[in-house]
Structure formats: structure tokens, C-alpha cells
Amino acid sequence: MNNRQIINLTQRYVANTYARFPVALVWGKGARVWDADGKEYIDFVAGIAVNSLGHNHPAVARAIRQQAAKLLHVSNLYHIAPQSELARELCRRSFAQKVFFCNSGAEANEAAIKLARRYGAEWLGGKYEVLSTHNSFHGRTLATLTATGQEKVRAGYDPLPAGFRQVPYNDLRAMEEAIDEKTTAAVLVEPIQGEGGVVVPDKGYLQGLRELCDQREILLIFDEVQSGMGRTGKLFAYEHFGVEPDIMTLAKALGGGLPLGAMLAKEKVARSFVPGAHASTFGGNPLTCSVGLAVLKTLVQGGALKNCVKMGRVLFDGLQALKQRFRFIREVRGKGLLLGMELEQDGGKIVEDCLKAGLLINCAAHKVLRFIPPLIIGKKEIGQGLAILEKVLARQ
Ligand SMILES: *Cc1c(COP(=O)(O)O)cnc(C)c1O
């Protein structure tokens, strides 16, 4: 099938929830993908920060093959070796002592919210409320879209569940004033906002939130669904800020392209989950966790994380150079390979023109071009991507 035929099928049979670009991607290798008409693209989207090891990575393909030849799925009625091993590796490398596995970012946040409520019921005299921030993104389930600070995500879904409020991001004072002595159980934030337009908070913000939560004896939850697993040049973005949460959520890159999410927690909080309190049929299954282990190993021992730091600088410098040249670029920001370029105007047209010219990028919060290539990307692909972007920008 060519692009046109695939597009026709989608339009006829697939629910109309996505505004898609008019191409079907069918093959990939490293930081390059090809569409059904054979056209090649440099991939600065990476499945929205999912394909950290790029496409067709041998370690991922091997883990899938090997595990598929053994056992794809068993129920959590039984112990699952790759799940326990992945949990151990995540705990060893983070603040956490316990992990709950699921299949997506929304589910990971759903688990975090449920754990915060159980902890609140057990230890905080029945507090339940979760405070989050404007322009945040936490997922599309009813609870997580209610925690999400964007009207467009919530429109049409009333009545929304109770127990959520938002305050401006990077505003410590607003959070302090919003914490309700009687109801607030947790603060939920992204250490760096992704969908909100790659927003890096001031250094004191996350530290301030930590102190605030300690003083009020409530929980601090970091949503690292996008920023985690090496994306920012550290395994977890919170490491940049010297602040640890009580609960953290992961997904996107965790499964190397397979659907895998996780909620990590400190022991004293995780204890509020007891048998029957929460569950997921597919969560932590042998296949996804085997791949998760291979991904983590490749990041830490295989050099992908180091490459992210190096290539992050190369891409940042390249984008910064474009900013010098084009006056309509307001700012270049981000960490590692989670980078954004804020424009004076809407970036939709630039994204479309880049696609036509062979570069995949996307736009967050209307005016911010987002650059989230695979962490294994090389200088050559970055150079090619920047050259395309420069040509497109020059035509605006
Ligand atoms: C993508 C994302 C989610 C939602 O993940 P899904 O897997 O789509 O449910 C939640 N939080 C953040 C920060 C994200 O970037």
C-alpha cells in the first residue's frame, strides 16, 4: 500500500481522534524513517520521545526475539522474572524502593493518583486532593485529564472527578497558597514540562516544592513520562535539580517502543498499596519488561545516555545559531535532547514544510517547535536536520 491508500483506510475505519500528517511511516533505522511512498525523513520526533534508541535497534529487536521464543505473557497471579529485575534496576538507579508496572503514561499517573489517595486516607486523615499546574500534561483518562492544566483536553467531559486543582507552573507562591490544610494530599508536576512547550523551571522551584511538601507533610509526585529514561541527559530529569520526589511516573521511552509504564515510590508511600488495591492485566508482562531491561542497559552501559548529553549540546548550539539568524525565534531552551524553540508565531506551517522537506519535528503549545530525536542520533543526522530546518525557516 502507498501513502494514499493507507490514508484512505485510516479515514474510513479509524476513529477520528488525531489530526494526522498525510504520510504513513512504514520503516525506520536509527534516526531515519521512510514513508509508504519510499520518501526518507530525519526523525526529530521519535514517536514523541518514545523511540530513544531509534528504530530497529539491535538490542531491542534481540530482546523481543528472545523473550517471544520463551514466554510473551503470564498473569500477575504469578511472579515474573523480567518484571522483578526491571523493578530492581529502576530502584537501584532512582530514589524509589517499589515499582508498579502498567502500559502507558496516563495509567502510570492514574496509579500515582490512586496511591496518593490511599496514602492520604491511611496517613493524612483523609486528604485526597492533587494540585498540579497550568499547561501541564498528565494523560487522557478521566482522572489524568482532570489533573492536566489544559482546557482543550477536558472539553466535553463533564462532570470531571473531584479533587483536582491547578496553579501556574514555576510559581512557588501560588502552590503554597493553594495547598489546603484539610484536603491537599499531593503536588503533581513535570520536572520539565513537555507538551506545555518544553518549559524548564527556575532552579529553586522544584526544591521549593520539596520543602513545601515536607513542611505540610504531603506527597511530591514527579511526572517523568516524557523527561525520564535519559531524555534530558540524566536518567531522570529530577537529578538535574537535586530534588527527589515521593512518587515518580515513567512511560514513553521505558519500553523501547513497546507499551510500558511504571509508577515508582518510596517504601513508606508504596506500603499503602496492598493486594487488590490496584492491578493491570498486561502491566509488567515478560515481553515489555525484557525490552525495558535491554533499553535501560543500552542507555547506561551502552553509551546512549552519554551520547544524549553530547548530541544535546550539538543540537542546542545549532538551534541557538538559527536564533541568531532569524528574528522571529524568541528562545531556545531545554535539556539534553528535550529541546524547544519558541517562535513569535504559530509553528504549524513550519512543521508541515519540514515534513515536505524530509524532517519530522512537532509543535507543542502552538508556538514551540519541539526537538526530541532518538538519543542515539549522530552528528550527521543532526546536521542534516538542522540544514532542512534552516532552509524552511528562511522561507517564512
Ligand atoms: C505523554 C505524556 C503522558 C501520557 O502518556 P500516555 O502514554 O499517552 O498515556 C503523561 N505525562 C506526560 C508528561 C507525557 O508527556
Image (tube, rainbow, N blue to C red):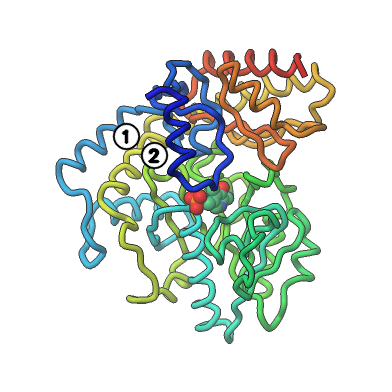
The residue located at (61%, 55%) in the rendering is 243
Q: Please tell me in which quadrant of the rendered image residue 102 appears.
A: bottom left
- Residue 134 lies left or right of residue 315; in this view the side is right
User: Which element carries disc 2, helix, strand or loop?
Assistant: loop
Circles 1 and 2: CB atoms closer than 8 Å:
yes
Q: Please tell me in which quadrant of the rendered image residue 133 appears.
A: bottom right
Q: Is residue 217 visible?
A: no
The type of residue carrying mark 1 is Val
The type of residue carrying mark 2 is Gly
Residue 187's label in the rendered image is none
Residue 256's label in the rendered image is 2
Instruction: Quickly name the residue at label 1.
Output: 60
Q: Nearer the viewer, residue 135 or 171?
A: 135
User: Which element carries disc 1, helix, strand or loop?
Assistant: helix
The residue located at (57%, 13%) in the rendering is 384
- Residue 378 lies left or right of residue 370; in this view the side is left
| Vertical order, 313 against 290 (above or below) | above
| Vertical order, 283 against 271 (above or below) | above
Expressed as whole percent of the image width and height from the top left, the position of residue 86 reads 33, 51
Expressed as whole percent of the image width and height from the top left, the position of residue 48 reads 53, 38
Q: Residue furthest left?
A: 70
Expressed as whole percent of the image width and height from the top left, the position of residue 208 reads 72, 60
